[in-house]
């Protein structure tokens, strides 16, 4: 900061406060131990001890927390939608994700696929879609609990032979709370017992009314296992994305959210980031939650090394000093020193909070024992 008290200055110079007060008196300044000294006076005293005053950089941690999308309209361009698949257990979420991925992998990419980074992108008629393949519910609850909103569209998978189940309702509630549009995929249409009308009927009770019945919810009948209806589903995702007018500014430093992260024996901290605005580059100084570093390497969902990652792109990075948590925000800084300072300040803050929390627990334990 710009000023110091007499005692703070004494401490920094490793002198007794009384000695500093004497020096100040000699300069005609009558000061008490708690008196604030201005920059000039500090420099004068310090130079007397042959100490050069280096200005401290004020660490503005709030710059990280208060990230604003202050982009001008003319700087924005269309970005791919980020889609999460939710639904009751065994209704076919994983099978549907695999089916979508497999149908849309181009011949040149085939063979090199199935790198698991927690998210993947497909391209259909020149337009990309990003799918998060972290379990939908976990993605919603942990990420939203951390204040992150990563999903643009939710696909609600309901098995046509089973209908609406408890986790179906839970998924609807998550999507509604997050104000994310829902597309219903009525799955397992290949099954003898498939009854899509019953699914529609049951969902109307949760205010998801099909377009055919005068509502505005899109229903698509699919068989994830046979790959049927997948093209229709993708078309509907593109349609909803267009309506949502999803945009970002690719020409700024990147910001986004951690999808997943872990410690890798060989590579150290490995994190899958979803770029939500801006473009991430190799070498960027970055703060990720309470961790920091420089983007050392980036790998895409096909396992290929990439140098840049634009809006809505999931990418796995290395180069962080520690492992961040899913749902953490990340932000690129132009200055590496600043990224380090902010990262360290945030990690210190978190450690202090944890220490307080654990000492509180210890006290409670103590009282419980009494
Ligand atoms: P999740 O728990 O929602 O991820 O469900 P899974 O994708 O693991 O699927 C659960 C079971 O349903 C598996 O045995 C799948 O093979 C099966 N399954 C998924 N989709 C279909 C489908 O379209 N038709 C049929 N007949 N079975 C399916
Ligand atoms: Mg699954």
Image: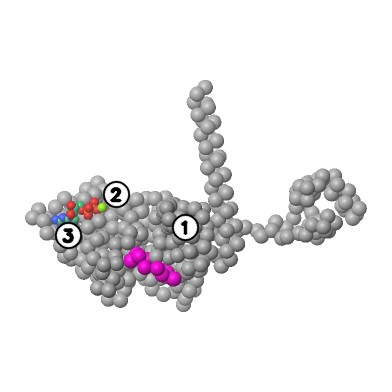
Q: As rendered, which of 27 and 305 lies closer to the eye? A: 305
- In the visual, does 109 lie left or right of 367? left
Q: Badge 3: how crowded within 10 Å, few (<14), some, or many (20+)? A: some
* Whether residue 16 can be seen here: yes
- Tag 2 secondary structure: helix
Q: In this rendering, which labeled residue sits more in front, label 2 or label 1?
A: 1
Q: In this rendering, which labeled residue sits more in front, label 2 or label 3?
A: 3
Mark carried by residue 170: 2
Residue 309 included in the magenta stretch of the image: yes
Coordinates of residue 305 in the picture (x, y in percent): 40, 68
Q: Is residue 360 above or below residue 8?
A: above
Q: How far separated are the C-alphas under marks 1 and 3?
A: 36 Å
The answer to whether the residue bearing label 3 lies less than 8 angstroms from the nearest atom of ligand 1 is yes
Q: How far separated are the C-alphas under marks 2 and 1?
A: 25 Å
Q: Who comes first in sequence, dot 1 or dot 3?
A: 3
Residue 109 included in the magenta stretch of the image: no
Majority SS type along the magenta span:
loop
Q: Quadrant of ligand 1?
A: bottom left
Coordinates of residue 167 in the picture (x, y in percent): 26, 48
- Tag 1 secondary structure: strand
Q: Residue at x 74, y 55 (%)?
A: 3
Q: Who comes first in sequence, dot 2 or dot 1?
A: 2
- What span is in magenta? 300-311
- Please give the residue where the numbered disc 1 appears in the rendered image: 329
- Please give the residue where the numbered disc 3 appears in the rendered image: 225
Q: Badge 1: how crowded within 10 Å, few (<14), some, or many (20+)? A: many
Q: How far separated are the C-alphas under marks 2 and 3?
A: 24 Å
């Amino acid at each position: 900061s710009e000023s110091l008290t007499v005692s703070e200055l004494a401490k920094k110079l490793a002198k007794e406060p009384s000695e500093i007060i004497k020096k100040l008196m000699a300069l005609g300044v009558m000061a008490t131990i708690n008196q604030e000294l201005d920059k000039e006076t500090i420099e004068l005293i310090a130079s007397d001890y042959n100490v050069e005053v280096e200005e401290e950089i004020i660490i503005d941690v709030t710059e990280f927390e208060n990230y604003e999308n202050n982009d001008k309209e003319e700087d924005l361009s269309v970005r791919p939608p980020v889609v999460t698949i939710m639904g009751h257990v065994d209704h076919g979420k994983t099978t549907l994700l695999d089916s979508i991925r497999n149908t849309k992998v181009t011949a040149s990419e085939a063979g090199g696929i199935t790198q698991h980074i927690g998210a993947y992108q497909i391209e259909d008629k020149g337009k990309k879609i990003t799918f998060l393949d972290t379990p939908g519910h976990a993605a919603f609850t942990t990420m939203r609990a951390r204040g992150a909103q990563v999903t643009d569209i939710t696909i609600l998978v309901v098995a046509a032979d089973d209908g609406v189940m408890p986790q179906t309702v839970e998924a609807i509630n998550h999507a509604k709370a997050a104000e994310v549009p829902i597309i219903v995929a009525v799955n397992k249409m290949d099954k003898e017992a498939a009854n899509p009308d019953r699914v529609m009927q049951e969902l109307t009770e949760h205010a998801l009314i099909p377009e055919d019945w005068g509502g505005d919810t899109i229903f698509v009948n699919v068989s994830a296992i046979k790959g049927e209806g997948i093209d229709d589903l993708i078309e509907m995702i593109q349609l909803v994305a267009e309506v949502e007018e999803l945009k970002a500014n690719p020409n700024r430093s990147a910001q986004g959210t951690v999808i997943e992260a872990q410690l890798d024996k060989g590579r150290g901290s490995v994190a899958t980031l979803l770029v939500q605005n801006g473009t991430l580059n190799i070498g960027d100084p970055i703060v990720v939650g309470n961790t920091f570093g420089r983007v050392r390497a980036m790998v895409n969902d096909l396992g290929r090394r990439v140098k840049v990652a634009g809006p809505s792109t999931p990418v796995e990075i290395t180069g962080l000093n520690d492992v961040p948590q899913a749902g953490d925000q990340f932000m690129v800084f132009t200055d590496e020193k600043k990224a380090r300072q902010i990262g360290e300040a945030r990690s210190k803050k978190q450690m202090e909070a944890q220490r307080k929390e654990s000492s509180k627990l210890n006290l409670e334990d103590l009282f419980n024992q009494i």
